[in-house]
Image (spheres, rainbow, N blue to C red):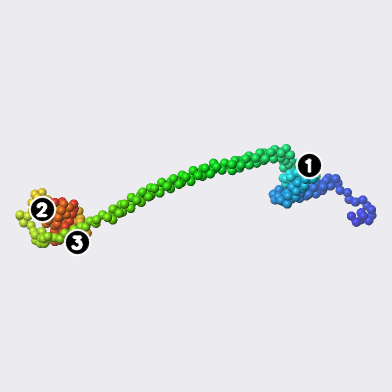
Amino acid sequence: YVSEKVGGAQGTKLDEEFLALEKQTDALAITVDVVKARTIEVLQPNPTARFKLHTQGAYQKIMGGTKNAKYPQPEAVLGDAMEKNAAELGDELLLSQALTDAGQSSNISDEDLKIAEEKFLESKELAESGMINLFDNESDQIGQLLAFVEALEQFYRQSSEILTGLSSSLHQKMNEAVAKPRTERKIYKPTSSPPSYDDVNSVDESDNYAMVGRNDYAEPNNHAAAAGGGKPSAKALYDFTPESDGELGFHEGDIIYLLTRIDENWMEGSCNGQTGYFPTSYVEIVVNLP
């Protein structure tokens, strides 16, 4: 290269194909940078730039401008950049054609914008009309709320009446229970001494009782019970546990010798060397008192 300059020789010439490729390469690098920057604006809009352009449009309108500046859409700006740089790359490249198609799809015509604006205004009017009607019908809404409150009031009033009646009834029953005299059970004491062991367990020909092994207590045999003879006695149907002094306890199957009848529900008798009174519903009379 130095020898060519000193000697005045002609410089190295590059062929046209190489120059064209070099130009396309530079254009592609510029295209990538521009598309990248415009894509960032789409993904991350700059509110300051939008406000500035909006202010310029308002200023032109005040000054009587014949044509207002369009509101810049980042998508439209990106589409314009794709189409412009696609032309720099040349129509013969498939990449250039793809950028052109993508740029055209990003642009929105004025007619489409006008239609969208008209639909937006229509929707806005419908929403505004609905909100106005909502607030104009306050009386209906208040009436519905009033009906709900009145229903609640009636429910709680009826509940209060029911609870008041129940409380009055319970007070009355409680007063009756308090005024009712307490039932006192009379403690009966034996009127005679209990029979001896020989009297209870003796066996002879004139006595129809015999010892039968059942719970270690005396029990009348079936022959004596069927005949109905012998001493006044009863057979225990259930176990009876004394709950107060003077009562006679026994087990099921025990023979109780009757001494006296206290009333229709209680009798006095002896069993196993003990004397006391017991309920007649717990025994079966074998030989009744005379």
Query: Which residue is identified by label 1?
Result: 67
Query: Which residue is identified by label 3?
Result: 245
Secondary structure beneath label 3: loop
- Amino acid type, residue under disc 2 in the picture: Leu
Q: Nearer the viewer, residue 120 or 135?
A: 135
Q: Is residue 115 left or right of residue 212?
A: right
Residue 49 horizontal/vertical position (percent)? 74, 50
Q: Residue at x 20, y 56 (%)?
A: 240
Residue 22 horizontal/vertical position (percent)? 82, 48
Q: Residue at x 89, y 50 (%)?
A: 12
| Residue occupying the far left of the picture | 206
- Amino acid type, residue under disc 1 in the picture: Lys
Q: Residue at x 47, y 45 (%)?
A: 150
Residue 74 horizontal/vertical position (percent)? 72, 46
| Residue occupying the far right of the picture | 7
Secondary structure beneath label 1: loop
Query: Which residue is identified by label 2?
Result: 289
Could you give the CA–CA distance between mark 1 and mark 2, rounded to whole angstroms? 133 Å
| Res. 249 in view | no
Secondary structure beneath label 2: loop
Q: Nearer the viewer, residue 14 or 116?
A: 116
Q: Residues within 10 Å of mark 1 (few under 14, many from 20)?
A: few
